[in-house]
Image (cartoon, helix red, strand yellow):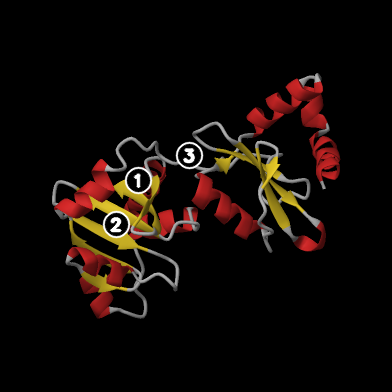
Amino acid sequence: MLKRLTVNPDSFSLSDMENQLLDIEENKIERYIHSKNRQLVQTIVDDYCVGIVHAEQYLSELGNALNLLSPHLDMIALLNVGTKKMGFRTIHDEIDVSAYAKRYGGGGHPKASGCGLTEEAFKKYVINVFDIPPMRPDPDRNELNIKGASYGTFYQNSNGEISYIQPQPEGKYVIRIAEKKLPQLFDSYEEAEGYLKRNYASWLRFDQDCLKELASSKSISVEDVKKNYPAIMTKLLNEQV
């Protein structure tokens, strides 16, 4: 490949076999990211909201992907207990992970850094989070309970708390948890969701769970709720505004 690139740089192209190998590698990376996203643990460490995952390969790709999947997190911590190393990745301009890594004797760049897994770091990033369940990824096949819906969106967390991002007049949003409205008023849906995820570790509720609960509360069938979901939710929203 290098010889072909050197001899004919203007006409260089990958062979069918090389393209196939690249596709296989990309699929491996995608599966790895999908698997690690389901192992991600959210917690507060040193005043940062951090997603922690144990990983040994594709660290750059994994760190970037997990940050994009959970932008409410300040950073992703990538741990390798075997090599006693840990890395940090962020997508936020206001977060400097190189400065953070220096706390543990490491360094790097503002958005990518690393350090040794010291005894202090091991306690904070392994022992203290051992009993925290992994984050639940948001469902990607919902058709009714979707982000930014005009009639509102349901979330839930591992404690069983059901929350609801409710649109308000003039493009504002509020959050209700167990029928109690939080005092904050948010300027965007993304801001409200970020607050909910950071402070309550909530995930987007599955369509089927929303349908079953509404059917039970309205004493109608799940199919009837599904057919009239926007109307039912709009009525509920109007009752709460």
Residue 92 can be seen in this image = yes
Q: Earlier in the sequence, mark 1 or mark 3?
A: 1
Disc 2 designates what residue?
A: 59
Name the residue type under label 1.
Tyr
Determine whether, in the image, residue 236 is placed left or right of residue 174.
right
The label nearer to you, 2 versus 1, is 2
Residue 57 can be seen in this image = no
Name the residue type under label 3.
Arg
Residue at image x 78%, y 19%? 221
Tell me where residue 10 appears, x and y as whole percent: 36, 80
Rendered position, 233 above or below 88: above
Q: Are marks 2 and 3 in contact (CB under 8 Å)?
A: no
Rendered position, 63 above or below 106: above
Residue at image x 31%, y 79%? 9
Question: Separation of disc 2 and disc 1 at Cα?
Answer: 10 Å
The label on residue 208 is none
Residue at image x 22%, y 71%? 107
Residue at image x 61%, y 34%? 206
Disc 3 designates what residue?
A: 136
Rendered position, 166 above or below 48: above
Tell me where residue 149 appears, x and y as whole percent: 73, 49
The label on residue 32 is 1
Determine whether, in the image, residue 123 is placed left or right of residue 174.
left
Q: Secondary structure at mark 2?
A: helix
Q: Earlier in the sequence, mark 2 or mark 3?
A: 2
Task: Count neighbours of disc 2 (C-alpha within 10 A) and say few if under 14, some if 14 to 19, many if 20 or more.
Answer: some
Question: Separation of disc 2 and disc 3 at Cα?
Answer: 21 Å
Q: Secondary structure at mark 3?
A: loop
